[in-house]
Image: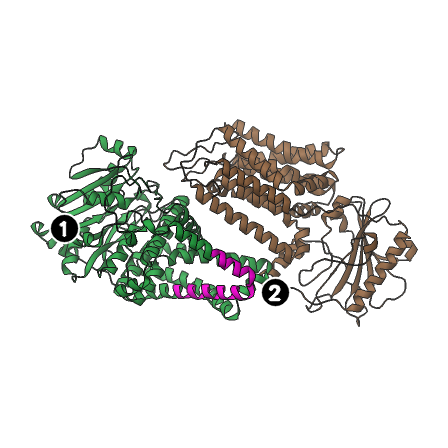
Amino acid sequence: MSDVGHRTWVLPDHLSARTALTRPTKTLIAALAGIAGGALVAFPGQVLPVLGTAVTLLYLASTIDRYVLMINGLNRPALVRISDEEARAIPEEDLPFYTVLLPVYDEPSIIDNLINGVGRIDYPRDRLELLLLVEEDDDATRQALESAQLRDIRVVLVPHSLPKTKPKACNYGMSLPGLRGEYITIYDAEDIPEPLQLRRAVAAFRAAPDDVGCIQAKLGFFNEQQNLLTRWFSMEYTQWFAVVLPALERARCVVPLGGTSNHIPARVWHSIGGWDEFNVTEDADLGARLATHGYRTQILDSVTLEEANSDVVNWIRQRSRWYKGYLQTMIVHLRNPAELRRAIGTKAALRFVNMTGGIPMTAIVNLIFGLLLVSWTSGRPSAISLLFPPITYYLCLVLFLVGTPLAIFLSFVLVLATGKPYLWWSALLSPLYWGLQSLAAIKAFYQLLFRPFHWEKTVHGLGTPSTGGTSPGPTG
Amino acid sequence: MLGISVGKPSNPLPGQLWLRIGILAALTTAGFAVLAVSAIRGSLAGSYSAVLLALPVLAILIASGLRPAPGVGDTEFDWIVAAVIGATGFLAVALLSQRLPSIAGLWNWSHFGPVVWAMAAGTVLFSARHVLRLWRVWLFVLCLVPATPFLLFTAALGGTENSAVLAGGVVGAIAVYLATSTVGLSWRLLAAVVDLGVATGLGHLLGGLALVPRMAVVAGAVPVLSVAAVRWANHVRLAPSLAAHPARGSAGMPPVGARSYGVLGILAVALVALSPPVSNAQPQVLADRDWIDRMGLVPVADFGFIRLFLGPEASLTRYVMPGNTDPAVAIDVISAPNLARLADYSDAVWYPSAVPVNHRRADVGETIGLGARSVHSDPDTVGGDGNWYALSWLWRTDPGYQQVIVAVDQDLSAQRRPPIPEPLTWTNSLLSPMLWLTRQQPPPSGAAPKKVVRTADEVARQIIEAGTA
C-alpha cells in the first residue's frame, strides 16, 4: 500500500487491519495448512476423527451460543425506548451540536435520496453539521451535485488515496478543522432515518450511565417485500438488531455496530482512535474497540430504513465484504488474546469471536457439511465415516435433525414476535439463504487472502420504496 | 490465481457472444471427446439414442430464445459458483456411479459429465446469472442426455424406428416451445404443434432413410426452422444480446482474460485424460448359430416385451436344460440383429430385485475373451419372488448378436425356476433404486450360495463349449 497520499487517522499497526495478514502470516498459514495436509495424508485414521470432532464441537458451541442469544433477546428485550414526547421535550437550545457524516460513492441519484432521507431529520439546522463526503474521482456523484442547491449540507471532496474505503472518507471528514459536533453519526446516502432519531439519541445518552459510549439505532428496509431475498435479508436484520444486539448488550458483550446510525460522542470517538481505514467493516471493529476501552453500546428503538439488497450477486458482494471485515476484526483483536480477555472478560471474548469471524466460518462449515451429506448419501466414501466417529456422528445428526428445524422455528417465532408475520414463508425457506451465505463466505476468505482492503461497493437503486417495508419509527 | 478479476462487465457484440458459445462448445467437445465419439458411433450403428446428436443444437436453440438477465455481475462469484457446480456435480456422479455401477451404466450417468462441465465453464464465460437463468435449458438437457428416458419413451411408443423418429419429433416440439418464450403462449403452442406435425410427416416420408438423417430432420432441422419462422413472424432477434440492462450495475458478459481461458483449457485436457476408455462394443467371440439345438435346450417361453426396447427383430426366449437340474436353471437368450441397440441395454437387469444389484466380472470364458459378468439379488434381503443368480455374456452369432443369461434360483430347496424377465420401467430401473439409496441402506453384502454359482458356471461352460465347438 504505497499510495497513502493524504494521511487521515491511521490507527497504530496493532489496532489496524492494515497488518492483519502480512506476508509472513500468510506463509505461516500456508505452512500450517501444509503440515495439516501432510498429517491428513500420512495418518488419516487419527487426524480425520480429531478434525471432524473438533469442527463439530466448535460448530455446536457456536450454534448453541447464537440460540441462547436469540432466546434471551426474545425473552428480555433490552432496547432503549425514548418516546416522541421525551424526544421533543428537549428545548432546541439544549440540543448539542451533531455531526452527521454522509459518505457516498457513485450515487447519481444522491439529491433525491438526501431529500427523502436525512432531509427530514427533525433537528435544529443551526446545530446540525451535515458533511457529504464525496470521493475526488467520483464523477457520477459530483455531476449530480453540480446542479443542486444544497442548503445546510457541506460537500467535502475526499482526496484520492488508498485504501478507498468508507472509513477513510469518514476519518477525512472528521479531520476537518472547525467541526463542532458533540455527537457524531453516519448515514448512507440512501438511508431514511426516523426523523426524531437524533433527538432520541441525545435523550438516550443523557439518561444513560457514563460508560455508554455508543447508541446504535435499528436498521430496517423500505423494500423488504420486494422479493424473497429482501424478505430473508429483512428477517435477518430484524433478528440482528431487535434481538441479538440487545441481548449482547445485556450480557455485557461486544456489540458489532451496524454500518450506519451509530451515534457516538465525539470525545469517545477521538479517545478510541476513530475508524480503521483498512477494515472493511469498520463498524464492527469500532464496536470491539469501544468494548475494549470499557464503553458499552446500547440499542435504540428507532429505525433507519435502508435499501435491502434485491439482487443475489449484489447481495453476495455486500455480504462477502461484511464477512471479510468480520474476519479482519477478529484477527486484529485476537492478536493478543490475553489482553482482549483482560479487557472484556472470557465470556465476552469467546462470544466476540463467535459473532465476528465465527459467522463466516460456520457458513463455510455449513457448505462443507452439506457436501459431505451429499457425498455420503451418494456413495458412502470411507473417508467420511472416518471423519465422524460415533459420538461425533450423533452430534452432527442432532445438529442436522434438531438444529435445522429449530433455527427455522426460531426465525418463525421471531417474525411473529417482531410484528412481521408476512415473512413466515421466507423463514421456512431460510436454509436456502444459508447456502447464499456460504458462497459469500468463500468469496470473503478468498478476498481476505488476496484483496484484503478492497471495498466491494454495493450497487444501490435496485429497490423501490413502494415494495413494502417498515415504517421508520420506534417499533414499540 | 485463476485470472480472477472484478471489473465492469463488458458490453459484448453479437460476434463476441457467438465466439464464446463456440469456445464453450469446443471446450465441452474436447473435454468429452471420447464420450462424443462413442455417442456418434452408437447412433450411426443404429441406436435409438440418435437424438443425442441433435441435443447440442436444441440446447443452443432454447438458450437463444431467453431474454438476458438484468442485474449486477461479479467475476469472483462466477468462479465460485463454477467451482461449486463442478465439484458437486462431478463428485455426485462419481460417487453414485461407484455405488450403483449397473444403474449408472444403464442410465448413462457418465453423460452428465459434459453437462456439468458446460454449466461450470459457461458460468465463467457467460456469468452465473446468465447460466442459472438458462435453467430450463439445463433441465431439458439433463432429462435427455442419459438417453435412457428417450429409449423408454420410444419403447412406450412401440419400439420401432418410426417410434424413435416420433419420439424425436416430440423432443423437437418441446424444444420449440421452450425456445419461443419471448412470444405469446398461443404462438408457442401453435409452433410446437405445427413442428410436431411437420416432423411426423417428414419422418414418415423419409422412412427409407437411416435413423440418423431422419432424426436430424425431425429433431434438428424442423425445430430450428420452426423457431426461426416464429421469431421472424414476431420480429424477434435470433440471438438475444447479453448486453447490459439499462438498470445500473447490470451484467453483460463478464470479462474473461487469457489466464481464465488457459485454466479452462487445462481443465478440458485433464478431463480428456481422466475419461475412461470406451470399451470395444464388438464381442470377440463368434458362436455357432446351432448351439441351442446342439445342447438340446427346450424353449419354454417367449417374452415379446423385448421388441419394445431392441426393435421388432429382437427376441427374448427362455430355454431350460433337458432333464432336471439342482438347483433349477433357466437360459434366457436375447437375440438382436443390431449390436448398438443391444449395447444400449447391456447394463440392464431384467429380473426383479428388492435392492439395486450390480454386475461383476466373472471368470467363465475368460480365456477366450468372453467378457462374462455375474449379477445376483441379495440373499440377505427378502425378495418377493425369491432370489436369483445370473451369469451373462454377449457374443456374435451369424447373423446378429446374442446376450446369453444363465439364471439360477438361489433357493436350493424350492426347486423352482428363476423369476421370469420383466420389462424395464421408470420405477424398477430408477425410482426404486433411488428411493433405496435415500433410505441409506447398507450395500448388499450377501453372496450367492456356492452351489448356485458352481451350477451357473457349469451350465455356462457347457454353452460355451456348444457355441464354440
Is residue A252 something one can see in this rendering?
no
Instruction: Say above or below: A86 vs A193.
Output: below
Q: Colour of chain B?
A: brown
Instruction: Say above or below: B15 vs B400.
Output: above
Q: Which residue is mark 2?
A: B441
Magenta segment, principal secondary structure? helix
Q: Which residue is mark 1?
A: A182
Indicate the chain on which mark 1 is placed: A
Side (left or right) of B362 relative to A53: right
Disc number for residue B27: none
For the residue marked with disc 2, what is the amino acid?
A: Gln
A54 within the magenta span:
yes
Q: Position of residue B385 (x, y in %)?
A: 73, 65
The segment highlighted magenta reads: A33-62
For the residue marked with disc 1, what is the amino acid?
A: Glu
Q: Nearer the viewer, residue B25 or A451?
A: A451
Q: Nearer the viewer, residue B293 or A73?
A: A73
Label 1: element kind: loop
Distance in Å between CA atoms under marks 2 and 1: 69 Å
Side (left or right) of A346 relative to A377: left
Q: Colour of chain A?
A: green
Residue at screen point 18% across, 38% down: A154
Circle 2 residues within 10 Å: few <14, some 14–19, many ≥20: few
Circle 1 residues within 10 Å: few <14, some 14–19, many ≥20: some
